[in-house]
């Protein structure tokens, strides 16, 4: 990328004046609000921060746009966590039943500043994607997918013996992050603002993700025991244990997006299957670690 095309403006979702300055000085055609306290587990520990950034932050941003007199199109990152305990498959008509401070803050932001302000300010173009989990080799290491791929790659190279997870049976709809960024852009190219579910339509358990990532690295995981005593073995070695500190106080058990509306109206579809995504992530971590090993040997 040409570095001259990118200008970083310092700011904070908690600072209305900083947001106003960012809008005034960049005069954007499109604004993508991806800023969030995005770790669901952390939101149980820091619920005020979730509200401050994920709810009030969007309010400050929308007001900065309204006060500027400019009319950029705004994309708000909503999330499958807003569906919470609603049964899958989830689509745009599914009732929202969030169970985490993260999901609740995102839902309030959507209801007040996307749906509410769209009615209140007729010239405001604001829309939202209900994005299911989107992953890539760039995913933060505290999210479960990347935690699994990097840990297994380290185990494969003899750099680590084992790692721990929480709930292995949670079901998620995992897709490839660049496809989801494409969907956000497509939403803003529409004439009228509309909201879309973006997901692959397929769900897998955390357990299945572990098995697929191990298999991409030519390892086979076998499960022994039950509950907190369950372990994942490769050959005669325990590579995975369960630690209750990684369980959430309230879990969203089953998410699976129905992206029919996005397929129909903006021709969006995912480009990678689940096994392709897992393999991409696992092999990327393996290659990166091998490169680092060579550099420091
Ligand atoms: O990878 P996760 O932390 O993602 P989660 O909670 O589904 O949220 C992600 O996707 C949402 C939808 O796009 C975003 F809105 C949100 O910002 C974030 O990007 O956890 C996935 C599942 C959960 O059920 C969790 O309980 O994995 C389970 N899990 C089991 N062991 C674990 C672990 N999650 C983490 N982070 N770490 C564990 O050790």
Image: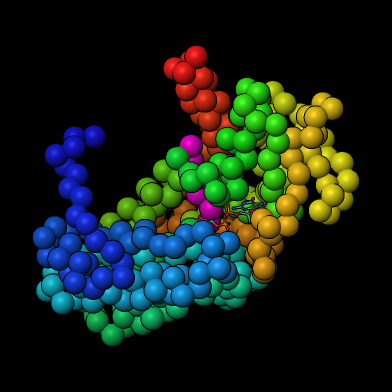
Residue furthest to the bottom in view is: 120
Percent position of residue 229, x then y: 84, 49
Relative to 110, 31 lies left or right: left
Residue furthest to the front in view is: 297
Magenta-colored stretch includes residue 136: yes
Relative to 115, 86 lies left or right: right
Relative to 15, 250 lies left or right: right
In terms of image quarters, where does ligand 1 lie? Answer: bottom right
Q: Which residues are magenta?
A: 132-137
Specify whether residue 223 is in view. Answer: yes
Residue at 54% from the left image edge and 62% from the top image edge = 42
Relative to 235, 246 lies left or right: left
Percent position of residue 74, x then y: 28, 65
Magenta-colored stretch includes residue 210: no
- Where 133 sits versus 292, above or below? below
- The quadrant the N terminus occupies is top left
- Where 232 sits versus 103, above or below? above
Q: Main secondary structure of the magenta part?
A: loop
Return the residue nearer the eye: 119 or 63: 63
Residue at 55% from the left image edge and 26% from the top image edge = 286
Percent position of residue 213, x then y: 65, 34
How many numbered dots are placed on residues in this image?
0
Specify whether residue 88 is in view. Answer: no
Residue at 12% from the left image edge and 74% from the top image edge = 69
Residue at 83% from the left image edge and 54% from the top image edge = 227
Return the residue nearer the eye: 182 or 79: 79
């Amino acid at each position: 990328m040409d570095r001259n095309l990118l200008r970083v403006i310092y700011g904070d979702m908690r600072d209305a004046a900083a947001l106003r300055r960012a809008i005034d000085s960049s005069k954007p055609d499109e604004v993508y609000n991806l800023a969030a306290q995005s770790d669901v587990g952390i939101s149980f520990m820091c619920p005020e921060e979730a509200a401050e950034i994920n709810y009030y932050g969007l309010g400050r941003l929308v007001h900065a746009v309204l006060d500027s007199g400019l009319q950029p199109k705004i994309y708000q990152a909503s999330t499958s966590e807003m569906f919470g305990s609603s049964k899958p498959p989830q689509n745009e008509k599914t009732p929202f039943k969030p169970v985490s401070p993260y999901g609740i803050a995102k839902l309030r932001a959507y209801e007040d500043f996307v749906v509410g302000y769209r009615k209140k300010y007729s010239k405001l173009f604001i829309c939202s994607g209900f994005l299911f989990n989107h992953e890539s080799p760039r995913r933060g290491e505290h999210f479960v997918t990347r935690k699994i791929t990097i840990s297994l790659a380290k185990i494969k190279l003899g750099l680590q013996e084992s790692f721990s997870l929480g709930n292995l049976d949670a079901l998620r709809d995992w897709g490839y992050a660049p496809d989801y960024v494409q969907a956000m852009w497509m939403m803003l190219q529409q004439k009228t603002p509309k909201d879309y579910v973006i997901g692959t339509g397929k769900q897998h358990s955390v357990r299945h993700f572990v098995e697929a990532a191990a298999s991409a690295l030519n390892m086979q995981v076998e499960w022994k025991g039950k509950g907190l005593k369950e372990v994942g073995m490769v050959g005669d070695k325990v590579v995975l244990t369960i630690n209750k500190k990684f369980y959430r106080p309230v879990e969203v058990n089953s998410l699976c997006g129905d992206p029919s509306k996005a397929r129909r109206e903006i021709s969006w579809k995912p480009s990678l299957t689940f096994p392709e995504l897992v393999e991409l992530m696992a092999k990327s971590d393996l290659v990166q670690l091998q490169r680092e090993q060579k550099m420091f040997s």
